Image (cartoon, grey):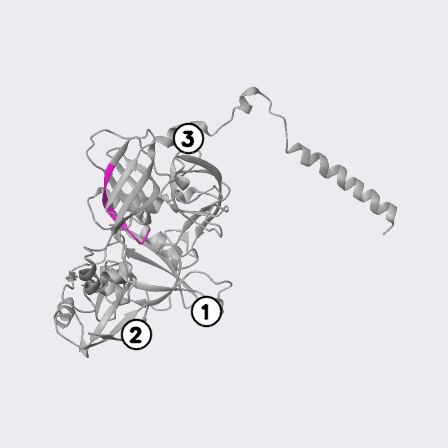
Amino acid sequence: MNPIRTFAVLCVSLALTTPLAAQDRRVPSSPAELKLSYAPIVQHVQPAVVNVYAAKVVQNRNPLLEDPIFRRFFGVPGQPEQIQRSLGSGVMVDASGLVVTNNHVIEGADQVKVALADKREFEAEIVLKDSRTDLAVLRLKDTSEKFPTLDFANSDDLLVGDVVLAIGNPFGVGQTVTHGIVSALARTQVGITDYQFFIQTDAAINPGNSGGALVDVSGKLVGINTAIFSRSGGSQGIGFAIPANMVRVVVASAKSGGKAVKRPWLGARLQAVSPEIAETLGLKRPGGALVASVTKGSPAERAGLKLSDLIVSIDGFAIDDPNAFDYRFATRPLGGAAQLEVQRSGKAVKLSIPLETAPDSGRDELVITSRSPFQGAKIANISPAIADEMRLDPSVEGVVVTDLPDDSTAANVGFQKGDIIVAVNNTRIAKTSDLERVAGQTARLWRIMLVRGGQQIQVTLGG
Protein backbone atom coordinates (compact mmCIF):
# COMPACT_ATOMS: atom_id res chain seq x y z
CA MET A 1 0.00 0.00 0.00
CA ASN A 2 1.14 3.53 -0.78
CA PRO A 3 2.54 5.04 2.49
CA ILE A 4 0.89 8.43 1.78
CA ARG A 5 -2.48 6.71 1.30
CA THR A 6 -1.91 4.73 4.52
CA PHE A 7 -1.26 7.94 6.44
CA ALA A 8 -4.37 9.54 4.92
CA VAL A 9 -6.54 6.57 5.97
CA LEU A 10 -5.10 6.74 9.50
CA CYS A 11 -5.88 10.47 9.73
CA VAL A 12 -9.46 9.90 8.57
CA SER A 13 -9.80 7.10 11.13
CA LEU A 14 -8.58 9.33 13.96
CA ALA A 15 -10.84 12.15 12.85
CA LEU A 16 -13.82 9.83 12.98
CA THR A 17 -13.08 8.14 16.32
CA THR A 18 -11.87 11.07 18.45
CA PRO A 19 -15.10 13.12 18.36
CA LEU A 20 -17.15 9.97 19.13
CA ALA A 21 -15.06 9.28 22.24
CA ALA A 22 -15.45 12.89 23.34
CA GLN A 23 -19.21 12.70 22.91
CA ASP A 24 -19.34 10.07 25.69
CA ARG A 25 -18.23 12.69 28.20
CA ARG A 26 -19.95 15.92 29.09
CA VAL A 27 -19.91 18.67 31.68
CA PRO A 28 -22.81 18.52 34.18
CA SER A 29 -25.58 20.72 32.79
CA SER A 30 -26.98 21.88 36.14
CA PRO A 31 -26.12 22.11 39.85
CA ALA A 32 -28.71 19.38 40.45
CA GLU A 33 -26.66 16.88 38.44
CA LEU A 34 -23.68 17.53 40.71
CA LYS A 35 -25.79 16.41 43.66
CA LEU A 36 -26.71 12.98 42.27
CA SER A 37 -26.09 10.53 45.11
CA TYR A 38 -26.92 7.13 46.56
CA ALA A 39 -27.64 8.82 49.91
CA PRO A 40 -31.47 8.50 49.71
CA ILE A 41 -31.17 4.74 49.13
CA VAL A 42 -28.71 4.36 52.01
CA GLN A 43 -30.88 6.39 54.39
CA HIS A 44 -33.81 4.10 53.57
CA VAL A 45 -31.83 0.87 53.91
CA GLN A 46 -29.44 1.49 56.82
CA PRO A 47 -31.95 1.22 59.71
CA ALA A 48 -32.83 -2.34 58.63
CA VAL A 49 -29.22 -3.56 58.52
CA VAL A 50 -27.86 -4.75 61.87
CA ASN A 51 -24.65 -6.03 63.43
CA VAL A 52 -24.61 -9.58 64.82
CA TYR A 53 -22.32 -10.59 67.69
CA ALA A 54 -21.99 -14.26 68.64
CA ALA A 55 -20.09 -15.75 71.57
CA LYS A 56 -19.15 -19.37 72.29
CA VAL A 57 -17.50 -20.79 75.40
CA VAL A 58 -14.72 -23.26 74.59
CA GLN A 59 -12.18 -25.10 76.72
CA ASN A 60 -8.45 -24.71 76.19
CA ARG A 61 -7.50 -28.34 75.74
CA ASN A 62 -4.15 -29.13 77.35
CA PRO A 63 -3.01 -32.80 77.29
CA LEU A 64 -1.38 -32.45 80.73
CA LEU A 65 -4.58 -31.10 82.28
CA GLU A 66 -6.52 -34.04 80.87
CA ASP A 67 -4.29 -36.47 82.78
CA PRO A 68 -6.15 -37.31 86.04
CA ILE A 69 -2.87 -38.09 87.88
CA PHE A 70 -1.38 -34.73 86.92
CA ARG A 71 -4.58 -32.94 87.95
CA ARG A 72 -4.73 -34.73 91.32
CA PHE A 73 -1.03 -34.16 92.09
CA PHE A 74 -1.03 -30.45 91.25
CA GLY A 75 -4.58 -29.77 92.41
CA VAL A 76 -5.75 -28.44 89.03
CA PRO A 77 -9.57 -28.16 89.19
CA GLY A 78 -10.33 -28.40 85.50
CA GLN A 79 -9.74 -27.04 82.03
CA PRO A 80 -9.72 -23.23 81.69
CA GLU A 81 -12.48 -21.76 79.54
CA GLN A 82 -12.18 -19.17 76.81
CA ILE A 83 -14.84 -17.17 75.01
CA GLN A 84 -14.65 -17.13 71.22
CA ARG A 85 -16.42 -14.24 69.55
CA SER A 86 -17.52 -13.77 65.96
CA LEU A 87 -18.81 -10.69 64.22
CA GLY A 88 -21.15 -10.42 61.28
CA SER A 89 -24.07 -8.51 59.87
CA GLY A 90 -27.76 -9.16 59.38
CA VAL A 91 -30.93 -7.81 57.80
CA MET A 92 -34.27 -7.14 59.45
CA VAL A 93 -36.88 -8.92 57.31
CA ASP A 94 -39.93 -8.73 59.57
CA ALA A 95 -41.13 -5.80 61.70
CA SER A 96 -41.56 -8.07 64.73
CA GLY A 97 -37.77 -8.38 65.01
CA LEU A 98 -36.87 -11.22 62.63
CA VAL A 99 -33.29 -11.01 61.36
CA VAL A 100 -31.62 -13.07 58.64
CA THR A 101 -27.86 -13.60 58.70
CA ASN A 102 -25.28 -16.23 57.70
CA ASN A 103 -25.29 -19.53 59.54
CA HIS A 104 -21.50 -19.45 59.88
CA VAL A 105 -21.76 -16.20 61.85
CA ILE A 106 -23.76 -17.83 64.68
CA GLU A 107 -22.77 -21.50 64.32
CA GLY A 108 -22.19 -23.06 67.74
CA ALA A 109 -22.91 -19.79 69.57
CA ASP A 110 -24.03 -19.85 73.20
CA GLN A 111 -25.08 -16.21 73.08
CA VAL A 112 -26.16 -13.95 70.21
CA LYS A 113 -26.62 -10.17 70.31
CA VAL A 114 -27.95 -7.86 67.64
CA ALA A 115 -26.96 -4.18 67.48
CA LEU A 116 -29.19 -1.81 65.52
CA ALA A 117 -28.06 1.17 63.48
CA ASP A 118 -29.19 3.46 66.35
CA LYS A 119 -26.69 1.69 68.69
CA ARG A 120 -29.29 -0.21 70.72
CA GLU A 121 -28.48 -3.85 71.48
CA PHE A 122 -30.83 -6.80 71.94
CA GLU A 123 -30.36 -10.41 72.96
CA ALA A 124 -31.47 -12.70 70.15
CA GLU A 125 -32.63 -16.30 69.92
CA ILE A 126 -31.85 -18.59 67.00
CA VAL A 127 -35.15 -19.45 65.29
CA LEU A 128 -33.80 -21.53 62.40
CA LYS A 129 -30.42 -22.60 61.05
CA ASP A 130 -29.89 -23.93 57.54
CA SER A 131 -26.35 -25.06 56.82
CA ARG A 132 -27.30 -26.03 53.26
CA THR A 133 -27.76 -22.38 52.30
CA ASP A 134 -25.52 -20.93 55.06
CA LEU A 135 -28.48 -18.89 56.32
CA ALA A 136 -29.91 -18.46 59.81
CA VAL A 137 -32.91 -16.56 61.17
CA LEU A 138 -32.83 -14.80 64.55
CA ARG A 139 -35.55 -13.14 66.63
CA LEU A 140 -34.94 -10.22 68.99
CA LYS A 141 -35.90 -10.99 72.59
CA ASP A 142 -38.00 -8.95 75.00
CA THR A 143 -39.33 -6.38 72.56
CA SER A 144 -42.75 -5.53 71.17
CA GLU A 145 -41.88 -2.55 68.97
CA LYS A 146 -42.02 -2.50 65.18
CA PHE A 147 -38.68 -2.38 63.38
CA PRO A 148 -37.76 -1.07 59.91
CA THR A 149 -37.38 -3.84 57.34
CA LEU A 150 -36.18 -4.42 53.79
CA ASP A 151 -38.45 -5.73 51.06
CA PHE A 152 -37.28 -8.63 48.91
CA ALA A 153 -36.51 -8.00 45.26
CA ASN A 154 -36.95 -10.69 42.62
CA SER A 155 -33.30 -11.71 42.24
CA ASP A 156 -34.13 -13.37 38.91
CA ASP A 157 -34.60 -9.87 37.47
CA LEU A 158 -30.95 -8.93 38.11
CA LEU A 159 -28.67 -8.38 35.12
CA VAL A 160 -24.91 -8.30 34.90
CA GLY A 161 -23.93 -4.63 35.09
CA ASP A 162 -26.72 -3.57 37.46
CA VAL A 163 -25.56 -1.23 40.23
CA VAL A 164 -25.74 -2.67 43.77
CA LEU A 165 -24.83 -1.49 47.27
CA ALA A 166 -23.33 -3.70 50.01
CA ILE A 167 -24.05 -2.75 53.61
CA GLY A 168 -22.55 -4.38 56.69
CA ASN A 169 -19.95 -4.10 59.44
CA PRO A 170 -16.56 -4.96 57.87
CA PHE A 171 -13.72 -5.60 60.34
CA GLY A 172 -15.98 -4.33 63.15
CA VAL A 173 -15.41 -0.67 62.22
CA GLY A 174 -19.15 0.07 62.15
CA GLN A 175 -21.86 0.13 59.52
CA THR A 176 -20.30 0.74 56.11
CA VAL A 177 -21.67 1.14 52.58
CA THR A 178 -19.82 0.17 49.40
CA HIS A 179 -21.07 0.11 45.86
CA GLY A 180 -20.33 -1.73 42.66
CA ILE A 181 -22.05 -3.71 39.96
CA VAL A 182 -23.31 -7.25 39.50
CA SER A 183 -20.23 -8.91 38.00
CA ALA A 184 -21.82 -12.29 37.24
CA LEU A 185 -24.93 -14.34 37.96
CA ALA A 186 -25.51 -18.02 38.71
CA ARG A 187 -21.98 -18.70 39.95
CA THR A 188 -22.05 -22.43 40.70
CA GLN A 189 -18.41 -23.47 41.18
CA VAL A 190 -17.79 -21.59 44.43
CA GLY A 191 -17.97 -24.49 46.90
CA ILE A 192 -19.51 -22.58 49.84
CA THR A 193 -22.91 -24.18 50.32
CA ASP A 194 -25.02 -27.05 48.98
CA TYR A 195 -27.00 -24.61 46.85
CA GLN A 196 -24.32 -23.01 44.72
CA PHE A 197 -25.99 -20.28 42.71
CA PHE A 198 -24.46 -16.99 43.76
CA ILE A 199 -24.61 -13.36 42.72
CA GLN A 200 -21.05 -12.11 42.15
CA THR A 201 -20.30 -8.45 42.75
CA ASP A 202 -17.28 -6.14 42.82
CA ALA A 203 -18.79 -4.07 45.66
CA ALA A 204 -16.18 -4.25 48.44
CA ILE A 205 -17.09 -7.05 50.88
CA ASN A 206 -14.77 -7.82 53.80
CA PRO A 207 -14.77 -10.00 56.95
CA GLY A 208 -17.71 -8.81 59.06
CA ASN A 209 -19.89 -8.16 56.01
CA SER A 210 -21.18 -11.75 56.17
CA GLY A 211 -24.96 -11.72 56.54
CA GLY A 212 -25.26 -8.10 55.41
CA ALA A 213 -27.46 -6.69 52.70
CA LEU A 214 -26.86 -6.44 48.97
CA VAL A 215 -29.48 -4.00 47.67
CA ASP A 216 -30.44 -2.59 44.28
CA VAL A 217 -30.97 1.06 43.40
CA SER A 218 -34.60 0.87 44.52
CA GLY A 219 -33.46 -0.11 48.03
CA LYS A 220 -34.75 -3.70 47.84
CA LEU A 221 -32.83 -6.73 49.09
CA VAL A 222 -31.36 -8.70 46.19
CA GLY A 223 -29.01 -10.88 48.22
CA ILE A 224 -27.24 -11.69 51.49
CA ASN A 225 -23.48 -11.16 51.33
CA THR A 226 -21.81 -14.40 52.35
CA ALA A 227 -18.26 -14.85 51.05
CA ILE A 228 -15.33 -13.35 49.22
CA PHE A 229 -12.58 -14.72 47.04
CA SER A 230 -9.35 -13.31 48.43
CA ARG A 231 -5.65 -14.09 48.67
CA SER A 232 -5.11 -11.44 51.34
CA GLY A 233 -8.20 -11.79 53.55
CA GLY A 234 -9.56 -8.46 52.33
CA SER A 235 -11.73 -7.48 49.39
CA GLN A 236 -10.24 -8.04 45.95
CA GLY A 237 -13.41 -7.24 44.04
CA ILE A 238 -14.88 -10.75 44.00
CA GLY A 239 -17.71 -11.12 46.48
CA PHE A 240 -20.63 -13.54 46.54
CA ALA A 241 -24.19 -13.11 47.77
CA ILE A 242 -27.03 -15.60 48.26
CA PRO A 243 -29.91 -14.57 45.95
CA ALA A 244 -32.96 -13.05 47.62
CA ASN A 245 -35.27 -15.71 46.16
CA MET A 246 -33.42 -18.37 48.20
CA VAL A 247 -33.38 -16.15 51.30
CA ARG A 248 -37.13 -15.71 50.96
CA VAL A 249 -37.66 -19.51 51.19
CA VAL A 250 -35.64 -19.78 54.42
CA VAL A 251 -37.39 -16.79 56.01
CA ALA A 252 -40.82 -18.19 55.09
CA SER A 253 -39.98 -21.46 56.87
CA ALA A 254 -38.91 -19.52 59.97
CA LYS A 255 -42.12 -17.46 59.95
CA SER A 256 -44.20 -20.62 59.77
CA GLY A 257 -42.59 -21.87 62.98
CA GLY A 258 -40.49 -24.60 61.41
CA LYS A 259 -37.11 -25.65 62.78
CA ALA A 260 -36.00 -26.78 59.33
CA VAL A 261 -36.48 -25.36 55.85
CA LYS A 262 -39.22 -27.04 53.85
CA ARG A 263 -38.18 -27.64 50.26
CA PRO A 264 -39.47 -29.68 47.33
CA TRP A 265 -38.07 -33.20 47.05
CA LEU A 266 -37.07 -34.50 43.63
CA GLY A 267 -35.90 -38.01 44.51
CA ALA A 268 -33.27 -38.28 41.80
CA ARG A 269 -29.49 -37.96 41.73
CA LEU A 270 -28.10 -35.66 39.03
CA GLN A 271 -24.66 -35.33 37.50
CA ALA A 272 -22.91 -32.72 35.39
CA VAL A 273 -22.46 -33.19 31.66
CA SER A 274 -18.77 -33.41 30.75
CA PRO A 275 -17.51 -32.74 27.20
CA GLU A 276 -17.17 -36.50 26.73
CA ILE A 277 -20.77 -37.15 27.83
CA ALA A 278 -21.97 -34.29 25.63
CA GLU A 279 -20.26 -35.87 22.63
CA THR A 280 -21.85 -39.24 23.43
CA LEU A 281 -25.30 -37.63 23.67
CA GLY A 282 -24.77 -35.67 20.45
CA LEU A 283 -24.95 -32.29 22.18
CA LYS A 284 -23.40 -29.18 20.62
CA ARG A 285 -22.07 -28.11 24.05
CA PRO A 286 -21.98 -29.52 27.60
CA GLY A 287 -25.02 -28.41 29.56
CA GLY A 288 -28.02 -29.59 31.51
CA ALA A 289 -28.33 -32.01 34.41
CA LEU A 290 -28.09 -35.73 33.66
CA VAL A 291 -30.24 -38.12 35.71
CA ALA A 292 -27.91 -40.69 37.32
CA SER A 293 -30.49 -42.49 39.47
CA VAL A 294 -34.16 -42.25 40.47
CA THR A 295 -35.46 -43.15 43.93
CA LYS A 296 -38.37 -45.58 44.00
CA GLY A 297 -41.66 -43.93 44.94
CA SER A 298 -40.25 -40.41 44.64
CA PRO A 299 -41.90 -37.48 42.80
CA ALA A 300 -39.33 -37.94 40.03
CA GLU A 301 -40.33 -41.57 39.48
CA ARG A 302 -44.06 -40.80 39.62
CA ALA A 303 -43.63 -38.03 37.06
CA GLY A 304 -41.85 -40.37 34.66
CA LEU A 305 -38.25 -39.15 34.97
CA LYS A 306 -35.88 -41.88 33.79
CA LEU A 307 -32.22 -42.79 34.05
CA SER A 308 -30.09 -40.88 31.48
CA ASP A 309 -32.74 -38.19 30.94
CA LEU A 310 -31.10 -34.79 30.42
CA ILE A 311 -32.91 -31.95 32.22
CA VAL A 312 -32.52 -28.77 30.15
CA SER A 313 -35.08 -26.42 31.73
CA ILE A 314 -37.46 -25.99 34.67
CA ASP A 315 -40.43 -23.62 34.48
CA GLY A 316 -38.79 -21.89 31.53
CA PHE A 317 -35.39 -21.37 33.19
CA ALA A 318 -32.50 -22.94 31.30
CA ILE A 319 -30.45 -25.48 33.30
CA ASP A 320 -26.69 -25.40 32.74
CA ASP A 321 -25.66 -27.87 35.45
CA PRO A 322 -27.02 -29.75 38.50
CA ASN A 323 -26.30 -26.78 40.80
CA ALA A 324 -28.53 -24.56 38.70
CA PHE A 325 -31.29 -27.17 38.82
CA ASP A 326 -30.97 -27.58 42.62
CA TYR A 327 -31.39 -23.83 43.12
CA ARG A 328 -34.32 -23.47 40.74
CA PHE A 329 -36.09 -26.52 42.16
CA ALA A 330 -35.48 -25.52 45.79
CA THR A 331 -37.03 -22.08 45.22
CA ARG A 332 -40.24 -23.46 43.68
CA PRO A 333 -43.28 -23.03 45.99
CA LEU A 334 -44.59 -26.20 47.63
CA GLY A 335 -47.99 -27.55 46.68
CA GLY A 336 -47.98 -27.09 42.93
CA ALA A 337 -45.92 -28.65 40.17
CA ALA A 338 -42.76 -27.77 38.27
CA GLN A 339 -42.61 -28.16 34.50
CA LEU A 340 -39.44 -29.90 33.32
CA GLU A 341 -38.16 -30.20 29.80
CA VAL A 342 -35.84 -33.15 29.27
CA GLN A 343 -33.97 -34.60 26.33
CA ARG A 344 -34.58 -38.35 26.02
CA SER A 345 -32.89 -40.24 23.18
CA GLY A 346 -32.60 -36.98 21.26
CA LYS A 347 -36.26 -36.03 21.67
CA ALA A 348 -37.79 -33.30 23.83
CA VAL A 349 -40.09 -34.58 26.58
CA LYS A 350 -42.12 -32.43 28.99
CA LEU A 351 -42.78 -33.67 32.54
CA SER A 352 -44.72 -32.27 35.48
CA ILE A 353 -43.03 -32.85 38.86
CA PRO A 354 -45.20 -32.49 41.99
CA LEU A 355 -43.67 -30.09 44.53
CA GLU A 356 -43.82 -31.90 47.85
CA THR A 357 -41.52 -32.42 50.83
CA ALA A 358 -39.62 -35.64 51.44
CA PRO A 359 -41.21 -38.01 53.99
CA ASP A 360 -39.39 -37.96 57.32
CA SER A 361 -41.02 -40.84 59.20
CA GLY A 362 -38.88 -43.37 61.06
CA ARG A 363 -35.93 -41.05 61.71
CA ASP A 364 -35.59 -42.33 65.33
CA GLU A 365 -32.80 -39.87 66.12
CA LEU A 366 -30.81 -40.46 69.32
CA VAL A 367 -27.46 -39.67 70.97
CA ILE A 368 -25.03 -42.48 71.86
CA THR A 369 -24.16 -42.07 75.55
CA SER A 370 -22.41 -45.36 76.35
CA ARG A 371 -18.62 -45.50 76.57
CA SER A 372 -17.53 -46.37 73.03
CA PRO A 373 -15.97 -44.73 69.96
CA PHE A 374 -19.50 -43.46 69.09
CA GLN A 375 -20.05 -41.62 72.39
CA GLY A 376 -21.58 -38.18 71.85
CA ALA A 377 -22.65 -38.78 68.25
CA LYS A 378 -26.23 -38.06 67.25
CA ILE A 379 -27.45 -40.68 64.79
CA ALA A 380 -30.60 -41.25 62.73
CA ASN A 381 -32.14 -43.75 60.35
CA ILE A 382 -31.82 -42.76 56.69
CA SER A 383 -35.27 -41.49 55.78
CA PRO A 384 -35.89 -39.82 52.39
CA ALA A 385 -35.78 -36.43 54.16
CA ILE A 386 -32.41 -37.20 55.79
CA ALA A 387 -31.01 -38.50 52.50
CA ASP A 388 -32.13 -35.36 50.67
CA GLU A 389 -30.92 -33.01 53.41
CA MET A 390 -27.48 -34.58 53.76
CA ARG A 391 -26.97 -35.56 50.12
CA LEU A 392 -26.82 -39.29 50.87
CA ASP A 393 -27.46 -42.28 48.66
CA PRO A 394 -30.87 -43.48 49.92
CA SER A 395 -30.10 -47.03 48.79
CA VAL A 396 -27.28 -47.43 51.35
CA GLU A 397 -28.37 -49.32 54.47
CA GLY A 398 -27.13 -48.08 57.83
CA VAL A 399 -27.51 -45.17 60.21
CA VAL A 400 -26.09 -41.70 59.63
CA VAL A 401 -24.24 -39.35 61.98
CA THR A 402 -26.34 -36.18 61.93
CA ASP A 403 -24.37 -34.18 64.50
CA LEU A 404 -21.52 -34.48 66.98
CA PRO A 405 -20.00 -31.94 69.40
CA ASP A 406 -16.40 -30.92 68.78
CA ASP A 407 -15.34 -32.23 72.21
CA SER A 408 -17.13 -35.59 71.93
CA THR A 409 -15.36 -38.94 71.84
CA ALA A 410 -16.86 -39.62 68.40
CA ALA A 411 -15.38 -36.40 67.01
CA ASN A 412 -11.99 -37.02 68.62
CA VAL A 413 -11.63 -40.48 67.06
CA GLY A 414 -12.43 -39.05 63.62
CA PHE A 415 -16.13 -39.54 62.91
CA GLN A 416 -17.74 -36.83 60.78
CA LYS A 417 -21.22 -35.55 60.19
CA GLY A 418 -22.69 -37.51 57.27
CA ASP A 419 -20.83 -40.76 58.01
CA ILE A 420 -23.05 -43.81 57.47
CA ILE A 421 -22.32 -46.61 59.96
CA VAL A 422 -22.91 -49.88 58.10
CA ALA A 423 -21.45 -52.54 60.45
CA VAL A 424 -19.70 -52.81 63.83
CA ASN A 425 -17.75 -55.92 64.88
CA ASN A 426 -19.39 -57.92 62.07
CA THR A 427 -22.89 -56.88 63.17
CA ARG A 428 -24.97 -55.17 60.49
CA ILE A 429 -26.38 -51.81 61.56
CA ALA A 430 -29.84 -51.33 60.03
CA LYS A 431 -31.38 -48.88 62.51
CA THR A 432 -30.35 -46.60 65.37
CA SER A 433 -31.33 -49.10 68.05
CA ASP A 434 -28.83 -51.57 66.53
CA LEU A 435 -25.94 -49.15 66.98
CA GLU A 436 -27.11 -48.13 70.46
CA ARG A 437 -27.14 -51.79 71.52
CA VAL A 438 -23.72 -52.59 69.99
CA ALA A 439 -22.15 -49.41 71.43
CA GLY A 440 -23.25 -50.50 74.92
CA GLN A 441 -21.19 -53.68 74.74
CA THR A 442 -17.63 -54.00 76.04
CA ALA A 443 -15.00 -54.61 73.37
CA ARG A 444 -11.19 -54.51 73.19
CA LEU A 445 -11.30 -53.68 69.48
CA TRP A 446 -13.97 -51.94 67.41
CA ARG A 447 -14.04 -52.99 63.76
CA ILE A 448 -16.22 -50.47 61.99
CA MET A 449 -17.42 -50.32 58.39
CA LEU A 450 -18.72 -46.93 57.27
CA VAL A 451 -19.52 -45.02 54.10
CA ARG A 452 -18.15 -41.50 53.69
CA GLY A 453 -18.62 -39.47 50.53
CA GLY A 454 -19.81 -42.55 48.68
CA GLN A 455 -16.66 -44.52 49.57
CA GLN A 456 -16.66 -47.57 51.90
CA ILE A 457 -14.06 -47.36 54.69
CA GLN A 458 -12.86 -50.02 57.17
CA VAL A 459 -11.72 -48.68 60.57
CA THR A 460 -10.26 -50.50 63.58
CA LEU A 461 -10.18 -48.69 66.93
CA GLY A 462 -8.97 -49.74 70.38
CA GLY A 463 -11.51 -50.31 73.16
Coordinates of residue 45 in the picture (x, y in percent): 38, 32
Mark yes or no: residue 234 visible: yes
Residue 82 position, x and y percent, is: 27, 49
Amino acid type, label 1: Ile
User: Which residue matches tag 1?
Assistant: 277
Residue hosting label 2:
456
Instruction: State which quadrant residue 395 falls in.
Output: bottom left
Disc 2: CA contacts within 10 A as few (<14), some (14-19) or many (>=20): few
Position of 205 with respect to 65 (left or right) is right
Quarter-of-image position of residue 292: bottom left
Which of the marked residues, 3 or 2, is nearer the chain's N terminus? 3
Magenta highlight range? 123-133
Residue found at the very far bottom of the displayed protein: 426
Give the dominant element type of the magenta stretch: helix, strand or loop: strand
* SS at badge 1: helix
Amino acid type assigned to the residue bearing label 3 in the image: Val
Write down the residue under mark 3: 42
Report, in whole angstroms, how far the alpha carbon at label 3 lies from the one at label 2. 53 Å
Q: Verify whether residue 130 appears in magenta.
A: yes
Q: What secondary structure is found at the residue carrying circle 2? A: strand
**Closer to us: 362 or 90:** 90
The Cα–Cα distance between marks 1 and 3, rounded to whole angstroms, is 49 Å
Q: Going by the picture, which residue comes out furthest to the top? A: 31
Image quarter hosting the C terminus: bottom left
Q: Where residue 154 sits in the image (x, y, percent)?
A: 38, 41
Q: Is residue 33 left or right of residue 92?
A: right
Q: Depth check: 308 or 242 in front?
A: 242
| Mark 3, other Cα within 10 Å: few <14 / some 14–19 / many ≥20 | some
